[in-house]
């Protein structure tokens, strides 16, 4: 919430998927203006004077091009799935690696987190080791493709963070994954 500002402009920009949050704009004793739609805006002219406005994508690009150009590239998350009890990606995931590499290569100083996961089959110790092996395998694949290892952090979460909840020792292909978060 902005308070006691004058000659300020607040514009709500949508996320990549089109979703927006909400912002409440108030100045002095004025009524609150809720901005909860893409490109909704409020101009604070003076204390107590808030004027609701509506922008569109073209107007935002025109008026804020310098600020938008200075923004970092949005983070992306990729998922690779693995064969049961192995650190070998599924054939579909093998094909996904090229897309991940292209995204990383387009960033000047990428920060990459590679996080391995397993399903619930096996002991905690076994799954911790397997999840870390999966993360290491992805890291090695990326470094072989030319991404410097210093940009890649890895971790293994074992069976602690399933996407699909299952009974103990139940196999679940969606949980056998590596998350790659590129910033």
Image: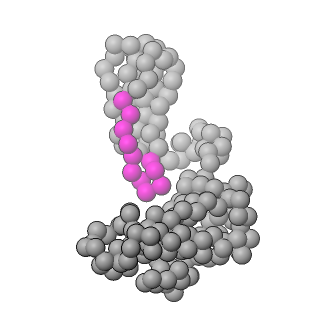
Quarter the N terminus occupies: top left
Pinpoint residue 131: horizontal percent, then vertical percent. Answer: 49, 71
Pinpoint residue 156: horizontal percent, then vertical percent. Answer: 50, 65
Q: Would residue 18 be visible to someone looking at this image?
A: yes
- In this view, the residue in front, 32 or 175, is 175
Residue 21 falls inside the magenta stretch: yes
Pinpoint residue 79: horizontal percent, then vertical percent. Answer: 48, 70
Give the residues drawn in magenta, as a range. 14-24
Pinpoint residue 78: horizontal percent, then vertical percent. Answer: 51, 67
Report the residue at 70% width, 54% height from top. 109
Report the residue at 50% width, 17% height from top. 6
Residue 100 falls inside the magenta stretch: no
Quarter where residue 162 is shown? bottom left
Q: Main secondary structure of the magenta part?
A: loop
Quarter the C terminus occupies: bottom right
- In this view, the residue in front, 137 or 129, is 129
Q: Residue furthest left?
A: 167
């Amino acid at each position: 919430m902005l308070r006691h500002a004058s000659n300020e402009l607040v514009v709500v920009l949508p996320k990549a998927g089109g979703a927006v949050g909400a912002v409440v704009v108030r100045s002095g004793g004025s009524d609150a203006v809720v901005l909860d739609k893409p490109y909704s805006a409020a101009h604070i002219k003076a204390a107590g004077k808030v004027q609701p406005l509506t922008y569109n994508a073209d107007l935002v690009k025109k008026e804020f091009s310098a600020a938008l150009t200075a923004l970092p590239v949005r983070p992306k998350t990729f998922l690779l799935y693995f064969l049961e009890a192995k650190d070998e990606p599924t054939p579909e995931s093998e094909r996904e690696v090229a897309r991940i590499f292209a995204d990383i290569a387009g960033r000047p100083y990428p920060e990459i987190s590679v996080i391995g996961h397993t399903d619930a089959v096996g002991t905690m110790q076994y799954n911790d080791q397997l999840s870390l092996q999966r993360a290491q395998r992805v890291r090695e694949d990326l470094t072989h493709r030319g991404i410097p290892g210093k940009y890649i952090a890895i971790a293994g979460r074992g069976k602690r963070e399933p996407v699909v909840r299952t009974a103990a020792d139940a196999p679940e292909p969606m949980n056998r994954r590596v998350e790659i978060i590129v910033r």
